[in-house]
Amino acid sequence: MPFRLRGDTGQAFPIYITVVAGLLFLALAYLAVGQAAVNRSGAQTAADASALAAAQEARHQLAAAWVDDVRDPTKWDEIFTGAVRIDNPCRRATQLATQNDAQLDYCGGTALRYTADVTTNRTVGDSVVPGTDNIKSTASATAVIKPLCTFDPPGAAHALPTLDCDGTLWDLKPDGDGDLPGPEDLFDVHLADQ
């Protein structure tokens, strides 16, 4: 019986090429998704840094206001609730956005809560996904200032109340002698849960 060749010899090669081309396309698509994720992560880092910078600047101003009024405890409650004037803490937020290769689109809030919105300077980049070469990532973050201190209402005319800052007691002297708590003792700054 003679040996016969079948007509389907070599049919696996075109299937192999089709499968390899499909896998290559998927790999490039995943690379595009990875590029977008990295760009988005950079935007979120810039937004977090900007919001924290604004809140820390506001905390510094609140602490300075408290030091100015340390001998007048009737004003302390306004300071710890953020009911005092804060002078543009978003200047520092702009600097942090720029340092993270982004631009600050918005910064604002109240004396105890600041939100920053940023857009990256870089685009997602060229990829197999059409239209992504001009897309920039955006992100938003909010930072909160939490007062750490409590005190009893002032009693005697010349006595200052004891300030309890997260378990640390500060016995303040009306004559200015002694240590005063720093901004980080008076207020905590952290990112808010989104």
Image (tube, grey):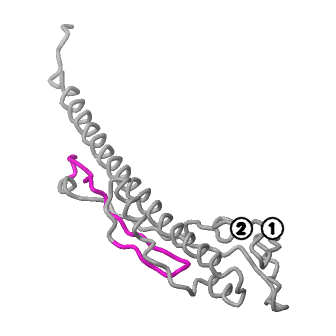
Q: Along the horizontal axis of the image, is 106 left or right of 174?
A: left
> Considering depth in this image, is 116 or 167 the residue closer to the camera?
167
Residue 120 magenta: yes
**Residue shown at the point (21%, 7%) measured from the top left:** 1
Q: Are marks 1 and 2 in contact (CB under 8 Å)?
A: yes
Residue 104 in picture, x, y percent from top left: 34, 66
**Residue shown at the point (71%, 82%) measured from the top left:** 71
How many residues crowd mark 1 within 10 Å: few (<14), some (14–19), many (20+)? few
Name the outermost residue toward the right.
Answer: 156
Amino acid under disc 1: Thr
Name the outermost residue toward the front.
Answer: 175
Amino acid under disc 2: Pro
Say above or below: 132 vs 10.
below
Numbered tag placed on residue 168 in the rendering? 1
Secondary structure of the residue carrying numbered label 2? loop
Residue corresponding to mark 2: 181
Q: Along the horizontal axis of the image, is 59 left or right of 28?
A: right
Q: How many marks?
A: 2
